[in-house]
Image: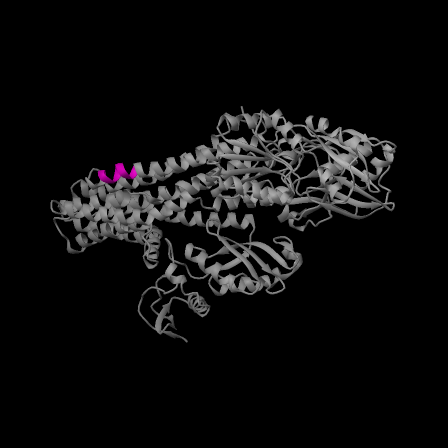
Amino acid sequence: MSQVVHHTIQGCFHCGLPIPTDTHYISQLEQREREFCCFGCQSVCNAIYESGLQGYYQRTPDGVLLGPPPEPPKDIEIYDFDEVQQEFTSCSGDVRDIHLLVEGIHCAACVWLIERGLNRTPGVQLAEVNLAGKRLHLRWDNSKSKLSTLIKALARIGYSAVPYDPESAEGSIKKTNRAMLFRLFFAGFAAMNMMWIAIALYSGANQDEFRSFFHWVALVLATPTLLYSGYPFFRGAIGGLRAGHLTMDMPIAVGLSVTYAYSVYVTITNNQHGEVYFDTVTNLTFIILIGRYLEGMFRHQAVSATKRLMELQPRVALVMREGMEQMTPIRGVKLGDHVLVKPGYTIPVDGIVLEGHSAVDESMLSGESLPVTKRIGASVSAGTVNTSGALLVEVRTQLQDTTLSKIIKLVEEAQSSKAPIQRLADTIVPWFVLVTMVCAATTFFIWNSQDFEVALMAATSVLIITCPCALGMATPMSIAVASGLGAKYGILVKNGLVLETLSKVTHFVFDKTGTLTEGVMSVAQVKFADGVNAEEAMRLAAAVERYSEHGVARAITRNAEEQQYPYRDIEVVDFHATAGLGVAATVAGQRVLLGSAKWLAQNSITLDVGLQSQVHQLEAEAMSCVYLAIADRHVAIIALADRLRCDAQQLVDELRTSGIKMTLLSGDRRPVAEAIAKQLGGMEVIAEVLPQDKDRVIHELQQAGAIVAMVGDGVNDAPALIRADVGIALGSGTDVSVESADIVLMHNELNKVLQATQLSRRTLRTIKQNIGLSFVYNIIMVPLAMMAKVTPLAAAITMPISSLIVIGNAARIRTLFKDEVKPNSKVR
C-alpha cells in the first residue's frame, strides 16, 4: 500500500506542510496517490481511511492547517492501574469518567474526527471535545476497553492524549505564547531595519544607482518575515480553503501576498516607475501579530477565573502517619487519611473534622466573607483557609470529586459552551469574509483605472481593516467573563445557553421547604391522644426517623435528644420511606408510621377526631403537621415550624416589581403553604404536590407560554429542575438536585438568585453591544478604506483595536457587583 519514492516539493496530503525533496511517502487512497511528508502523517491518514472517517478531510480545517501528528505518550499502560486512575477518574463500577489533555487538536474537524472515531470504539459511552481547552471528556466501560487502548486509538488518528493536569495545560498555553512571541520579535526586527531602507528610498535614493540595491535588501528582509512571521495567516487561510471555508485569515493573507508579489515584480524587473512596498509587508505583519498577541493576553486575563480557582488547590498536605507529620503530594493523599491543617494554611482536602476547633474562611468558594466556625464533625472543603486553630481532618472525597474540582469543571464547561446568539455569529463570519473579498476586488478595479499603486494600497487596506475577529469573539468572551464572575460570587453557571435564557424568564417557581424557608424544621408543639404515654411515643418516633434523611426526621430526632429521650438503643426493622407521604417501620413488634394524613389513610388507620380538630389552627400558623400512628392507632400530631429565610421577602419583592410571576410549589398541606405565601405578600400556591407531579406543573406553565425558572434544593425537586427552562439549585441542597440544575448557588442565600438574574441580563446586553460595536466599526472603516482614505499601516493598527474594544467591553462585566454588592451582602 505504501512505498518510499523521490519526488519534487509539494504539500503533504495530511498536514499540508512542504514535502522534503529527498524522500516522502505515498499511499493509494480511493484509487488515487496521496503524498505525505513523513511516516507519521502517512500512518495517521491510513488509519483514518481504514476507519471510514475520511469525511474528516472534507471538514479540515476550520481556519488552520494540521501539523504532523505529535509523538504518542510513552508507558501509557500505567494508566490502566486503578491506583493511578484514582488521581484522574471518577468511577461508578466499571464505568469510568476522565478528562484528557489532547495535543494536536486544531479545529472543528479535529473535534469531529475524535468524537466520531472514539464513539465507534467498544465500551465508549461518551466522547466530548472542548475545542477551546483542547480537552476530551471521556466516559467508558473499563471492562470492555482499557484506558491505554483508547489513548492508542487516539494516537492512530494523530492525537497524543494524557490525563488532564492543570499544570500541563498551563504549560501548553505558555508554549503557544512563546512561539507567537518569537514570530513577533522576528517581524519587529525586520520592521525596524526596513524602516532605515524606507527612509533612504523616500529621501531620494530611489532616484539614483542605489535604488535597485535597496530594493534587493528590502526583499531579503521581507521574504523570511512573510514566510516565518506571517506563517499563521497563510496556514489559516489555506486550511480554510481546503475545508471549503473562508476564514478570518484569508483577507490578511491575500493583502500581504499581493503587496509582496507586486514589490517582487518591481524589484526583479527594475521597473523605474513602480514603487516597492516591502516596508508595508513587514510593518503589517508586525502590527497584526502585536494585535493578536495582545488579544490572546487580554483574553487569557479576562477568563482567568479557572486559573485562579486552580491556584486555590494546595499541592501538598500534612498527612499524619504513625503519629508523625509527613509532607505528601496532594495526589498521594488517600480516602481515610488524616490530614493536619495548621492555622493560616489552606485546607487541601474535602473531609470531616476529627479534632480541633477553628474558624474557616470560605469566601473563595461561597462568597461568604465571615469565617465559619468548625468543630468536631463539621465538614470542610479544599481551597478554604483555616484562620485560627489547628484541625485534624479525615479525607472523605477524592481529589477529582472535591467541591473545588466540581466548581472548576462547571466553570470550564460554561466557558466552552455556545449560546444561540453565538451560533448565529459563527454563521455570519464566513459570509462576512466573502463580502470583504468582494469589496477589496471592487476597490481595486475602481481605482486601477486611475492609479495602479493607489488601487493596490486601497484594496490591501480593505482586506486588512475588516475585522470579523471582533464579531467572532463577541459572545464567547462575554460568556467566559460572566462565568468566571459568577464563580467568584458563588454562582455556578453550567453553560452559555442558561445565561441567555435566564434573562428572558417570565415565571419563577419556588420550592417551599429549604428554599423560601430555612429548611431547618423544629418541633413547635406535640398534641397527644388521650391515654398516650408522651415520652414513649416520641422515643419510638425518633427511633424510626433516625433512618431517614428528611428535614422532618432531623427535627424529630433533635427534639428527642433535647428532651433526653433514649431512643438509639431501640431496635428498628423493616424501615421504608415513600416520597411525599411518610415512613414506616416495625419497632418492638409494633407497626409505627409517621407522615401525612393521606399516609395513615392509605395504611387503613382511622384519624383521631380530637387531634384532627386541632390541625386547622396549627396549619394556619404555618406549621406542618406530622401524623404519628403506633400499633394501628393514631396517637399524636407533631407540629413543625420552619422560618422564612431572611432574604426571601426581598427576593419576592424585587421579582414582583420586575413584573415576574411567581408560584409557590410544595408537597406540604395547602393551609401551610398559603400561610407562607401570605407572609411573603401573596403569590400563586400549588400545594400537596407529589414529587413526580412537580415536573408536570412546570410543563403546564411552559405549555401556557411561560419561560420558567425553578428554584429548589431537594431530591424531589430534581425532575422539576430538569424540566424548567432554567433550574436553580441552592448549594445546601442534595447532590441530585445540584446535578440536575443549570445554575448552582454555592452559598445558601436567596439573594444569589437576583445576582444570577442581573448577571444574565448584563451578559446578554454586553453580547449585543459587542456585536453592534463590530458592525459599527466595519460600517465606518471599510468605506473609508475603499475611498483610499486609510493606508494599509493605519488599517493594521485599527484592526486589532476593534477586537481589543470587544475584549475590554466584555471585561466590564466583572464590575457588575462591585458597587452593588459585596460577595456576602444582600442586594439593595
Q: Where residue 456 sits in the image (x, y, percent)?
A: 19, 47
Q: Where residue 764 sits in the image (x, y, percent)?
A: 43, 36
Residue at 41% x, 76% y: name it: 1
Residue at 28% x, 42% y: name it: 465
Q: Where residue 163 sits in the image (x, y, percent)?
A: 57, 55
Q: How many marks?
A: 0
Magenta residues: mostly which secondary structure?
Answer: helix
User: 341 or 561: which is nearer to us?
Assistant: 561
Which contiguous range is marked in magenta? Answer: 777-784
- Left or right for 762, reference 371: left
Q: Is residue 7 above or below residue 306?
A: below
Q: Is residue 707 above or below residue 97?
A: above
User: 638 or 76: which is nearer to us?
Assistant: 638
Q: Is residue 567 above or below residue 117?
A: above
Residue at 84% x, 36% y: name it: 537
Within the magenta stretch, is there residue 459? no
Q: Can see residue 548? A: no
User: 791 or 662: which is nearer to us?
Assistant: 662
User: 375 or 654: which is nearer to us?
Assistant: 654
Answer with the quarter of the image where residue 386 lies: top right
Answer with the quarter of the image where residue 123 lies: bottom right
Q: Where residue 597 sits in the image (x, y, percent)?
A: 73, 38
Q: Is residue 144 above or below residue 661?
A: below
Q: Can see residue 627? A: yes
Q: How is the image coloured?
A: one colour
